[in-house]
Image: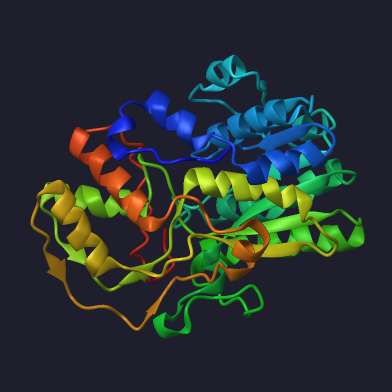
Amino acid sequence: MSHGVTPASSIESEADLEDLLSQPTPLVIDALARASGDILVLGASGKMGPSLARMARRASDMAGAPRRVIGVARFAAGGGEELESYGIETIACDLLNEDEVMKLPDAANVIFMLGRKFGSTGDEPMTWAMNAWLPTVVCRRYRNSRIVAFSTGNVYGLTSVTAGGSRETDLPQPVGEYAMSCLGRERLFDYFSRSLSIPMAIIRLNYACDLRYGVLVDLAQRIERGQPIDLAMGHFNTIWQGDANAMVLAALSHVATPAWVVNVTGPELLSVRPVCKRLGDLLDKPVQFLGSESPTALLSDASLAIERFGPPPIGAERLIEWVAAWVRRGGRMLDRPTHFESRSGRF
C-alpha cells in the first residue's frame, strides 16, 4: 500500500488530512511487522505526535502485529479522547516530573518527540531542561528499550547553498541557544546509548509540512495576505509530514549503539523565489520580494535517509499544490509559524 495519487481537491477537511497524514506506507508496515513489543510515543499531543501515533496503530494492525500503542503527553489542550478513538492508549503525564516518568509503563520501542523551540529566547533555562535534561530521565527509565529521538537540522547551522546541504558527518555548528540545547539533547542521548548500550536513532528533522503549518504554509499565507517575502533565507528543505512519520517509525529497524544519526527531509533543495512564484500562480496573487538571497541557508542533505528508506512518495510540487489549495480554501491553521527565515538562531 502506498500514498497513491491524491488530488489537492480531495483534501477538503481535517478528517481527510489526518487520514492522509497517518496513512502507512509499505516501508513502515514492514518495519513494524519486524519490530517486536509495544510502542510508547512521548510527546503525542504535539504537531506531529497524533498522526505518528495513529500511523503506528494503523501500520501495526495492517502488519498483523498485536501491540499497545501508547501516547504520553500532558494533554493540557485535550486531544486524548481523539487518540483513544483510534485505538491508541493515552497517559497524561508531566514529563518534566521524574517521578511521573518512572511510573510510565514498560515499552520495547520509544519515540521521543519532545522539544522546545518557540519561546526559547527569554526563557532559556526551560528550553535546556526540556531539550537537554529530559533525555537523561527518559534514558534511565527506558534503558532496556529501543529509542528513536527527534532532533533538528538546526544543530548544523548555516551552510553554503552550493554545497547541497549538511551531512550527518559534518561538524555541528549550532547558532543560538535553541540549537545549542538540541545538540545537548543529542549528546546526552548518545552518551546513554554508549554507556547503557541502548540502541538508538537520532532524527535530524528539517521542516516537516502539514497543510496547517510549515515553511510552505508560512510563505503561502504571506502571499495570500499581500505581504512581501524576505529572501535573506533564500533556500530551504521540507518534507510531507506523513512521509516524515513513516521514516521515523521505520528508523526502529535501524537503531544502533552508538546512536545512528540521520537527516530526515525532502530531497529537493528548494529556492524561495520560484516556490513563491508557483504559490502565487496557484493562489492567483501577486508576489512581492524584499532583498536578495544569501549564499548560506539552513539545509540538510537527505541522501542517507533516501538510501535507507527510499525517496519520499510525496514530492515538493505535490506538496506545494496541496498547501495552495488548503490556503485558498481557507483551511484551519495551527498558527505556529516556523520562523525559518531567522538567521540569528533566536526563537
Give the x, y percent position of residue 129.
64, 51
Give the x, y percent position of residue 11.
34, 32
Instruction: Confirm whether residue 26 shows in the render.
Output: yes
Report the quarter where the C terminus lies: bottom left
Question: As drawn, is 338 to the left or to the right of 324?
Answer: right
143 up-or-down from 172: above or below: above
Residue at left offset 43%, top offset 66%? 268
Residue at left offset 82%, top offset 28%? 105
Question: As drawn, is 177 to the left or to the right of 13?
Answer: right
Report the quarter where the N terminus lies: top right
280 up-or-down from 114: above or below: below
Give the x, y percent position of residue 66.
79, 24
Question: As drawn, is 304 to the left or to the right of 256?
Answer: left
Which residue is nearer to you in this view: 190 or 137?
A: 190
Residue at left offset 67%, top offset 37%? 42
Would you identify the image quadrant in which residue 346 lies? bottom left
Would you identify the image quadrant in which residue 294 lies? bottom left
Residue at left offset 38%, top offset 57%? 316
Which residue is nearer to you in this view: 208 or 45?
A: 208
